[in-house]
Each structure stands twice: as C-alpha cells, then as structure tokens.
Image (cartoon, coloured by chain):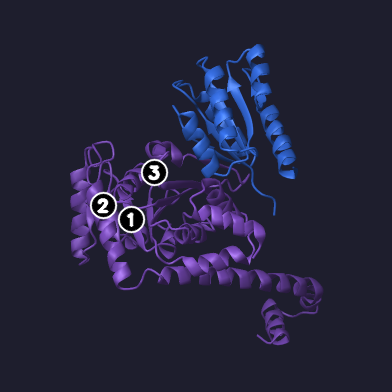
Chain colours: A blue, B purple
Amino acid sequence: MKKRIRILIAKPGLDGHDRGAKVVARALRDAGMEVIYTGLRQTPEQIVNAAIQEDVDAIGLSCLSGAHMSLFPAVAELLRKKKVTNILLFGGGIISQEDAEKLKKIGFKGIFGPGASLTEIIAFINKNVKKRRKE
Amino acid sequence: MNGKIRILLRDALRGNLRAIARLITMIEEEEQDGELFKFITKNAGHAHIVGFTGAPGVGKSSLISSVASKLCEKGERVGIIAIDPSSPITGGAFLGDRIRMADISLNPNIFIRSMGSRGASGGIARCTGEVALLMDALGFNTVLIETVGAGQSDIEIMKWVHTVVVMLSPGGGDDIQFAKAGLMEIANIFVINKCDLPGAEITYRFLKMELEEAGSDIPVIRTSVTKGNEGVPQLVETLTLYSKELKARKEIEILKYMILSNKTKQEILRRMEEKIDSWILEKGKSLLLSGLSPDECAELWRKENGI
C-alpha cells in the first residue's frame, strides 16, 4: 500500500496573513495529501513538536511579515537539534531572491514567492518526498 | 521480535515522541507486523478511552484541549486522536483540529495526533480504536478521541470507547430533536458547550425535560471554554468518576478485547476475501453463465470450502 503523504502547514511568528497558507493547504488536500494546519502565531518549538507527533513528510512555513530570516532558520535549527533529518522543508511568502538562496543553503529545498503556481508546489512535494522515502 | 519494532517500542515507552508517532503511522498504514499487536494485546487495558462527538463547530477540539489540560494537572498522561474527514474523491484531508489545541501543544504529558477518516464512515477512522489501544499500552492514562463533525446517525464512536460525550450547543433544536434516535442515544455524558451564548438556558431545559421524560439520569454539563473554562472541572470530575467505576467493575479491559476481536475479524475477512475473489475469478463467472443464481453459486462455494 502506498503511504499517504502528510504535510504540516504552519504560520510561525506574529504574522496574521494566512490566506496563502490556507490556499496551499487546500491545494495539497486536493492533490490527495493529508494536510495538518497548525493555525496562526506558532513558535518554532510548537511547529517542530507538531511535525514530530504527526509524523509528517514535510513542513511548509508561510511568513509574510518579513521575519522569515529569523523564524525559518529557527525551525531548521530545532529539527537539527532533535536529529530529525527525514522531514522536507519548504516555505513561502514575501521572500527576496537573496534570502531564498540563503534559506536553501540551510535546508529549505523550495521557496515559493508570490506568483508561484500550486501545480509547481505539488510537483515539488511529490518529487522530493518520494526521493526522501527511497533514501 | 522484529528489531525495528523492538527499538521503536523501547523508545516509545521512554516517551520518545518520534517513536510514538512512527508506531501510530504503522497502524494507520497497516504496515505493522504482528509484534506490535502482540505488545498491544499484552499491555493495553488500563486507560480510560473517551469519545467526544457532536456537530461540526460545536467546540470539540477546544473542549478536549481544556479537558486534557485539567487531566494533566491531576498527574495524568493524555493521548488525543483528532479525526477530520478525508476526501472521498482525492483521499486528501485538511486536518485542522490542532488549531484549537495550541495551548496544550507543548505539554510534555499530552500527545496529539490528527487523523484523516480515510474512507471509514460514522465519524471515525478505520484504525481509531487500535491507535487508542496503542496509546493505552504505552502508558497514557486517558485517551480522548474527537470524531469527525457528527450527524444524527454517526454513532460508530460508541464501539471504540468506554465513555461517549455528546456535545450540543445553544440553538441546536428543541425537545423533538433530542427525542430522535441515533446520536442522542449513545451519550454517557451530555455537554452543552458555548453556554455563554444566548439560548443556552432553553437548550439545557429542553434536554433535561427530554431526559426526564425518558427516565434517564445521564448527566448534562454546561461548559464554556471561552468563559474561563466554566464547567470543565465538573466534566473532568465526572470522567474521573466514570473511569474509577469502570476499573472497580473490571470493565476497563472489555473494550480492549472488543477492539482486538474486531481487528481479528478484519484480518479473517481480508484472508477470506482474497480466497473468494480468486474463486469467483476462476469458477464463478462460468457458473453464472451456465444459469446458476448468485445464491446457488455462493452455496456451492460454501460446500467446496467446508464452511
């Protein structure tokens, strides 16, 4: 039996704009995935804890407030500390090309800005989760 | 014993969250070997398993969060299984129950797992009971199960728990609704949540009146999570009392055998189904073509297999 893909979609920090996160969550649901949505104002600790308990394949972070360079690395760092290496990280929001490059270096495989297509995000997850499961 | 399972069980018993989560996934994906269920059969049968059910938006997640928090104050470890519907079309699911449980999400004595219903009907997921037993076997004292938002005929939960909490909210109907069969019959405890809202008093009176007419002494507890967790201590007290009574009557273990019997039945059915499918493929079609009725074919199959 094919294991169902489980994704945690989370909004770290104080940013309250969740339309993007919810649109992505619903698209992933429609692509046959189980999406756990944590809601707003989550700390990196809450996000990592939820991801572990839910045994997800990937965590998607959404941040539109400009705080992504402190919040995203905090999640990556916490996963490293807890020795969680099998969870795929991706993110979205108002993120400059320069920041996106930096985030990719610390483990965010995909960064999706305004205008990114849902098909692109779904394809990215399918491809990378499959790859990880084989490893 | 399978090495991988042994390590996972050892870590899970030490409270390792990743190990617990992995074991739950193994049950959900039916990828476990018999060892996991041997462990469950041996070690489960101590926890009080409670189902919370009611219409979508009645406040199940929020109330469970408050109840879990209170139970932890009493020194318990609490497992939560929160079920939301899976899409019958894509199989995907939007699992949003954690949103209302943010307050307890870092409590080291609470484990929350969201679950898609994955094609099961009646408000639960196929493996809900089995996952509850796993939590039980791992030492959780209480397991709280949140059903999919339920309608009048979604009563499946009663088969998988010791205690059913049926939740209502103000404005949800009059005594005629409460007299209807189904959901209203399976409650061990009624909760009228959001009792800070207008209409709570009349809903309470309608329900009390109906219960009185039916000669029922099922408790009705009024709660409000937003208004300082009003009524929650009373609900927790009632649950604790029920748990003690179940243990005193040695009834707590019965559920384990019911769930495991059901699992056994599923396992038998799966094996039978494989056999039946291949028999039909091999012989059934030609028998039907030769003029036998489906009933006659089935009789023939029964005799051939000595059942």
Residue matched to label 1: B165
Pointer 3 chain: B
> Does residue A21 sit above or below B57 in this rendering?
above
* SS at circle 1: strand
Is B78 placed left or right of B273 in the picture?
Answer: left
Residue B251 is situated, as x and y percent measured from the top left of the image, at 36, 71
Residue B212 is situated, as x and y percent measured from the top left of the image, at 18, 62
Pointer 2 chain: B
The residue at 50%/56% (across/down) is B13
Quadrant for the C terminus of chain B, please: bottom right
Residue matched to label 2: B235
**Residue B117 visible to an observer of this rendering:** no
The residue at 46%/29% (across/down) is A43
Residue B165 is situated, as x and y percent measured from the top left of the image, at 33, 55
Same chain, labels 2 and 3? yes
Residues tagged 2 and 1 counted as in contact (Cβ below 8 A): yes
What mark, if any, has residue B61 been given in the picture? 3
Residue B299 is situated, as x and y percent measured from the top left of the image, at 68, 84
Is B276 placed left or right of A81 in the picture?
Answer: right
Foreground tag (2 vs 1): 2
Distance Cα–Cα, label 2 vs label 1: 10 Å
Distance Cα–Cα, label 2 vs label 3: 15 Å
Q: Nearer the viewer, residue B280 or B273?
A: B273
Is B226 placed left or right of A79 in the picture?
Answer: left
> Does residue B48 sit above or below A91 in this rendering?
below
Q: Nearer the viewer, residue A108 or A23?
A: A108
